[in-house]
Amino acid sequence: MSEDIYLIDGSAFIYRAFHAISALTNRDGMPTNAVFGFASMVRRLIKERQPVCLAVAFDSRGPVFRHQLYDEYKATRPEMPEALAGQIPYIKELVKALGLVSFEEQGVEADDLIASAVNRLADSGSRIVIVSGDKDLLQLVGDRVTMWDPMSDKVMDRAAVRDKYHVDPEVLLHCFALIGDSSDNIPGVPGIGPKTAGKLVKQYGSLEQLYERLDEMKSSKMKQSLIEHRDAAFLSRDLIRLKSDCVVPDEPAGYRLGEPDNGRLKVLYTKLGFTNLLKEVDNAAPIATDGFRLVRDRQSLDELAAILAEASLLAIDTETTSLNTRRAELVGISLSCGLPQCWYIPLGHRDEAGELVAGQLLPNEVREVLEPYLTSAELPKIGHNLKYDYAVLAQASDVSLAGPLIDTMIAAYLTEPARRSLKLDDLCREIDIKMTSYEQVTGGDKRDDAFAYVPVEAAGTYSCEDVHGTLALWERLQPRLAEKDMLRLFHEIEMPLVPILAHMEVAGIKVDPQRLDDLAEEFREKLAAREEEIYRLAGHPFNISSPQQLGVVLFEELGLPHGRKTKTGYSTDAGVLEKLAQQHEMPALIVDYRNLAKLLSTYIEKLKLLIDEKTGRIHTSFNQTVTTTGRLSSSNPNLQNIPIRGEEGGRIREAFVAETGTVFLFADYSQIDLRVLAHYSQDQALLAAFRRGDDIHNRTAAEIFGVSPLFITPDMRRVAKSINFGIVYGMSSFGLANQLRISRTEAQKFIDRYFDLYSGVQQFMHDIVEQAKRDGYVSTLLNRRRYLPEIKASDKARREFAERAAINTPIQGTAADIIKLAMLRVDELLQGRPGRCRMLLQIHDELVFEVDETQCGALQEDIRRCMEQALPLDVPLVVNMQQGHSLAK
DNA sequence: GGCCCGTCGTAC
DNA sequence: GACGTACGACGGGCCT
């Protein structure tokens, strides 16, 4: 039995993929959507249909023979977008690497090549599947030829063509000639569409016949049009007719799918950033374990020590019983001073009875030998997520990891801040290293401390793989950082910050559990009262927390006018409810209920659960590799969004208290974003205002309202403040209008006035967007980057989003750079000081310290100075200091 | 019951 | 659709 032959209309697919898949890029910001779409389609085809013969045809570049027939052919088509043209070579390479036969011939289009193949294979007995969505190719459909559109999964055979066009595929050409095709700028006969064309061709059989027998036709508008556009009809037919004598193989063997070249595919997928496809060709090699050693006796430990003494770097990974560093006990340590040799020291492996297994050195003995190296200020330490190992070693062994630190997780983040996974095995897979997974080594054991029960041999291999992978990763990442000029950012900011964050996490912050309990009780009572009242007004109980159910009650049962709609129903957010409050008493109660429920579940109850039993404090995680701008984030719990506004917010803050004998010291940057904006934009008015020490909101208010600062009302200041904030976020008149509850026109007037006053800011916003378009990324003052591939998107919403990010990121990111620098300076200051002062929190523009009451006065000014001088800008940085016994200040 | 997404709300 | 960056609670649809 002869095989089916699949013929792909390559060029059509490239276009479709390009438009169907919005903005996809590799890590360098190169568009990859068309390649990805094409690759996915081919992959699916191969998987589902398992073709033996598969070929792809491409349009040739430049004019084709149809242009000689008609110089307006495809004239209305815009030129191929740059973002697509750049992908063509990769698609060609992909086709080659996949082992597909491909055709391209000067002066003809993909359709013609497919037609030629169909023609040449006519006598082969093979069935042919044309893979396309292009109706022109339906001309080729016949008894052994079908067309399949993998996007819609529709198959067109003779019956389907008849069904759709009321004629056989063989005469479809005549139909299309009459209909024309606006997308290819083929004229056809005006006034004739698919229906009429089908009828005419059915009746007359061909264009020639139609025109010969035109006299038989009753006079009508259509007849008139046919007469007038006779030439156009015949021209259209010539354009639509497929050329079927191109040079293509006439034997099925010439279409046979070859073996994929995995090496080539890997290079390509890696370059394109197609991690999922990469996994499928995955021929990543497992790591050779020849160089792995277990350290189970004194002699091995001494050998290791001898190597450490000569080492110029040290890779390290700790295995523990818990991800929570305060609970973590060491199970083992792996080390490497350079590949291929890696060492694993088992310390806390246990049998199922919980007894330590034999053949493990005593932790103290190991510590004594290793400590000088771990704490050496000269020996660089490399790890993946070193903050964790740093905290574990400090907590479990009282060892402070020192020396230049190198964290491959952070290095990967800096080079690719938008990356979703920074897991070691995912990063290693991209450099062809296959690692044993944690699940594999623990055999799916779900216990927190599962690793302690892993047999020592297996654990050793797993752990050694980790340090091995980390070292290999650094080899790859170091040059990338260098290329992007990020080595200083990495070595001088991010890395020294690691131990500081570790210390802040370890320090934690004290909360008063009794206060939380009291608050919880009070809030629960209030909530119950609101709930009852809301049910009474609704006439029945429902889930107030469900926006869906709430929408039904408000807008259907109570008949209140609904505002904007969301994807899932009516919007019930605070803005909508606020407007409704004038008409009904329920909306205000809902706002109140939501406020209480939010504070209770997100803060009060959650904080209570997270009080560490050992320390009685709350220990957040400060994440250094999450945000796209370079800010830190905080989680478990998020201590960067503890409420501050409103009376209830203050009550929650009161539960965070300074340790007995200490006081909180708060240091916050005044208007850091706007100062950075002044520096970036060099706007003269903004620079001058900050240099004079003006209150910037008052200054702005005075200018946009054209009044003396003495006559500024609170309302004027509020407007000015909104604009000042909005500017940093790239806000539109719509957004400002919404926030200030004024008309768009009024909002636009304010914005115009603002830009009259600060024209340099407007210029900056324009320039930074242009820069993003040119480079594909924007940078902060310290060279942090954010790639913005969507800045060139054709989708307006996506493009505008990228434009706002281009404006905001240098500002927000530079502010993040500054406070990180300040944290390093302050840390240095505190290390040289006797007495207790610990940095506890960073909240983007604010640092919170816990200081001995006796030290507070002396430290305050030093800390202020560190922060104000962290990075000299063209305007002064100003830091406000406050003290208090709780976070309520 | 776990996972994912949408909505909403808190911070800067 | 419309104001940038986060984290997280909750509801609800989906899958197992």
Image (cartoon, coloured by chain):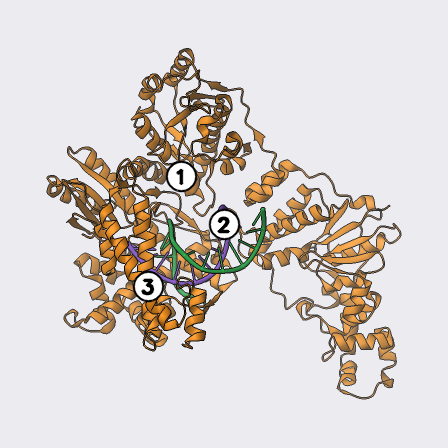
Chain colours: A orange, B purple, C green
Label 2's element? loop
- Density class for disc 2 (Cα within 10 Å; few <14, some 14-19, many ≥20) is some
Residue A410, labelled with which disc?
Answer: 1
User: Residue A302, how many percent across, how many down?
Assistant: 39, 13
Q: Nearer the viewer, mark 3 or mark 1?
A: 3
User: Residue A196, how many percent across, how many down?
Assistant: 77, 78
Nearest the viewer among A325 and A793 is A325
Label 1's element? helix
Q: Nearer the viewer, mark 3 or mark 2?
A: 3
For image coordinates 51% across by 29% down, the residue present is: A441
Dots 3, 2 in contact, CB < 8 A: no
Q: Nearer the viewer, mark 1 or mark 2?
A: 1
The chain letter for the residue carrying disc 3 is A
Q: Which of the 4 image quadrants contains residue A345?
A: top left
Q: In the figure, is residue A96 to the left or right of A369?
A: right
The chain letter for the residue carrying disc 1 is A
Q: Is residue A461 above or below residue A731?
A: above
Q: Is residue A543 above or below residue A323?
A: below
Q: Which residue is mark 3?
A: A593
Q: In the figure, is residue A855 to the left or right of A444?
A: left
Spatial CA distance of label 3 from label 1 is 41 Å
For image coordinates 87% across by 54% down, the residue present is: A122
Earlier-in-chain disc, 3 versus 2: 2
Label 3's element? helix
Callout 1 amino acid: Ile
For image coordinates 76% across by 66% down, the residue present is: A240
Earlier-in-chain disc, 3 versus 1: 1
